[in-house]
């Protein structure tokens, strides 16, 4: 696609349920990132994928959070047993090969998750 | 320790005037890239400008310029001739090369309000 696509755009879930958020990066982009942004706050790094390398999971806040990237393209962020503090906008971004420092990241529109 | 520090939570500027948004960074890696993104109230993340650590000249993109002072580890964004549409959150970000994190690390942001 022309840009980074995220789905759903909005998700309301009950506390304790599992949710899956999807990210479809720009074709040809080998790097993919997930960030979380709480209301009025900055972007909190969650996880980073680069090609076939092991992902950098250092930003995942707990073992309830996991992500995978299938075939080097689409990525799914899964949150198990959701809590109210998980409510935030989840942003996905992709970029060209990130072994260089320069490639800019293109962001999706985000998924607004509300846990009630 | 914070990798990216933005010390101005909010800034006001009169329309048509210039404004500087501060950003300092912390890295021991000689290779890194610095980015500025704009996030309007719609929530999208818009790339503005990039500066590489080895770039000899300050980056410019239209009304945006980056005042890069390597020794001070600062990468301030200068917006000239402010417009009402410049009202938004502005985030400074860094990607480290070498053994550092490849994902973008973001500052906490500065909310800019342009007044008529």
Image: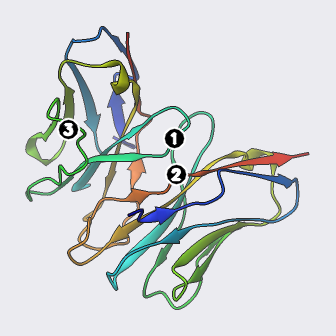
Q: Are marks 2 and 1 in contact (CB under 8 Å)?
A: yes
Q: Chain of mark 3?
A: A
Q: Chain of mark 2?
A: B
Q: Which residue is mark 2?
A: B108
- Residue A8 location in percent, x, y? 34, 21
Figure colour scheme: rainbow
Secondary-structure class at tag 2 = loop
Mark 3 vs mark 2: in front? 2
- Residue A51 location in percent, x, y? 14, 57
Residue plotted at (26% across, 30% down): A22
Residue plotted at (29% across, 74% down): A100
Co-location on one chain, circles 2 and 1: no
Q: Is residue A61 left or right of residue B112?
A: left
Q: Chain of mark 1?
A: A
Q: Nearer the viewer, residue A22 or B6?
A: B6
Co-location on one chain, circles 3 and 2: no
Q: Which residue is mark 3?
A: A75
Question: Which quadrant holds residue A50?
Answer: bottom left
């Amino acid at each position: 696609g022309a840009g980074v696509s995220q789905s759903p755009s909005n998700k309301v879930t009950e506390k304790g349920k599992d949710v899956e958020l999807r990210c479809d990066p720009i074709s040809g982009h080998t790097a993919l990132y997930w960030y979380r942004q709480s209301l009025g706050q900055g972007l909190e790094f969650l996880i980073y994928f680069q090609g076939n390398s092991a992902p950098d999971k250092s930003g995942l806040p707990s073992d309830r959070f996991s992500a995978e990237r299938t075939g080097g393209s689409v990525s799914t962020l899964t949150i198990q047993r959701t809590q109210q503090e998980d409510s935030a906008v989840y942003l996905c971004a992709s970029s060209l090969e990130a072994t260089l420092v320069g490639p800019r990241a293109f962001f999706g529109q985000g998924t607004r998750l509300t846990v009630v | 320790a914070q990798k990216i520090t933005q010390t101005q939570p909010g800034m006001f500027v009169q329309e048509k005037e210039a404004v500087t948004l501060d950003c300092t960074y912390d890295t021991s890696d000689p290779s890194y890239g610095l980015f500025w993104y704009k996030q309007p109230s719609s929530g999208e993340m818009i790339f503005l400008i990039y500066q590489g650590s080895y770039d000899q000249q300050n980056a410019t993109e239209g009304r945006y310029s980056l005042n890069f002072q390597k020794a001070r580890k600062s990468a301030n964004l200068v917006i000239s001739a402010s417009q009402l549409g410049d009202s938004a959150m502005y985030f400074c970000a860094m990607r480290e090369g070498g053994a550092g994190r490849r994902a973008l690390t973001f500052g906490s942001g500065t909310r800019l309000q342009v007044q008529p």
